[in-house]
Image: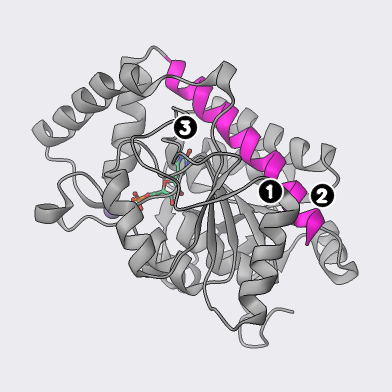
Amino acid sequence: MVPDTARPFIDILAPVADALAAGRPVVALESTIITHGMPYPDNAAMAARVEAIVAEEGALAATIAVVDGRIKIGLSDSEREALAKSRDAMKLSRADLGFAVSQGRTGGTTVAATMICAALAGIKVFATGGIGGVHKGAETSFDISADLDELARTPVIVVSAGAKAILDIEKTLEVLETRGVPVIGHGTEVMPAFWSRQSPYRAPLTLHSAREIADLFTTRRALGLEGGMLVANPVPEADEIPAAEMAGTIAAAQKAAEEEHVAGKAVTPFLLSKILELTDGRSLKTNIALVENNARLAARIAKAL
Ligand code: PSU
Ligand code: MN
């Protein structure tokens, strides 16, 4: 399944390789959320738990990362733990994935880079927390996540709780529409906002089951429509922080980022950790809950495919 030219750089964990060869359901998981999205040891516990949830649902998880220049499709427990503890892992997107491989570096893969690696390995479904998107103030900073372009070009279903609410969700939806990416609210007509079930914006499309989402993916491929799909799966009610409560916190985190001149790749990790601090850890609990919820749906979609 892996193209011949890429094979020398990729290690597929044995059970994942077996599952792929047998056509059994596999769900890719990203690792920037481990290296840059949550503090240790919560990140390690989350990463292990999410793999277990995928297994409970009858699919196999493959956490993707780059370790010493090797693209790993599936991490062993000790590799996952080491990555969670690492203090110098890179944050790898399309722009730097090849650099990390050619230089023998280690890094967490973002949504964009995880999509690329999943597609190389023949994995069609991938669960994350929230995608990157158009940052607030992008009209002057030009800060738009490479995740959006990747969704437009790489045929993987990304299950998320929407775009992270630190972003300009309206502009993010506009870019996704322009780039031809279907955005599907799972069981909702309202676009979720990561920690919150609701944003002020409509979900462009709505589907109610894993089966329907799998059918859409298959139909798009049959029609020759390239690129991926974004599934927006609202955080469970019991775990959500309502948008009105988050608004002030997000604004305060944004202000801190401006005052400290945080820019580029550092913006998203800075805002997430600032918000964790300002909410006394509540945002982290919600973030973990929504990732778990997305992993469950991703496993069901993988099975339906
Ligand atoms: N979801 C989370 N936490 C995260 C991320 C997603 O719950 O940290 C990561 C993903 O890897 C995503 C990245 O690709 O944040 C976006 O970074 P940027 O805005 O710099 O493109
Ligand atoms: Mn950015």
Q: Secondary structure at mark 3?
A: loop
Q: Secondary structure at mark 1?
A: helix
Residue at 64%, 34% in the rendered image = 293
Q: Nearer the viewer, mark 3 or mark 1?
A: 1
Query: Is disc 2 in contact with disc 1, using a CB cutoff of under 8 Å?
Result: yes
- The numbered disc on residue 261 is none
The x and y percentages for residue 242 are 41, 20
Residue at 56%, 32% in the rendered image = 290
Question: Residue 64 occupies which quadrant of the picture?
Answer: bottom right
Residue at 46%, 54% in the rendered image = 110
Location of mark 1 (residue): 298
The x and y percentages for residue 248 are 23, 19
Judged by its main secondary structure, the magenta piece is helix
Location of mark 2 (residue): 59
Q: Secondary structure at mark 2?
A: loop
Q: Amino acid at mark 3?
A: Met
Q: Is residue 188 visible?
A: yes
Question: Residue 224 occupies which quadrant of the picture?
Answer: bottom right
Q: Earlier in the sequence, mark 3 or mark 1?
A: 3
The x and y percentages for residue 245 are 33, 16
Q: Does 33 appear in magenta?
A: no
Residue at 14%, 29% in the rendered image = 255
Q: Is residue 166 above or below residue 62?
A: above
Q: Is mark 3 within 8 Å of ligand 1?
A: yes
Q: Amino acid at mark 1?
A: Ala
Q: Is residue 69 visible?
A: no
Q: Earlier in the sequence, mark 2 or mark 1?
A: 2
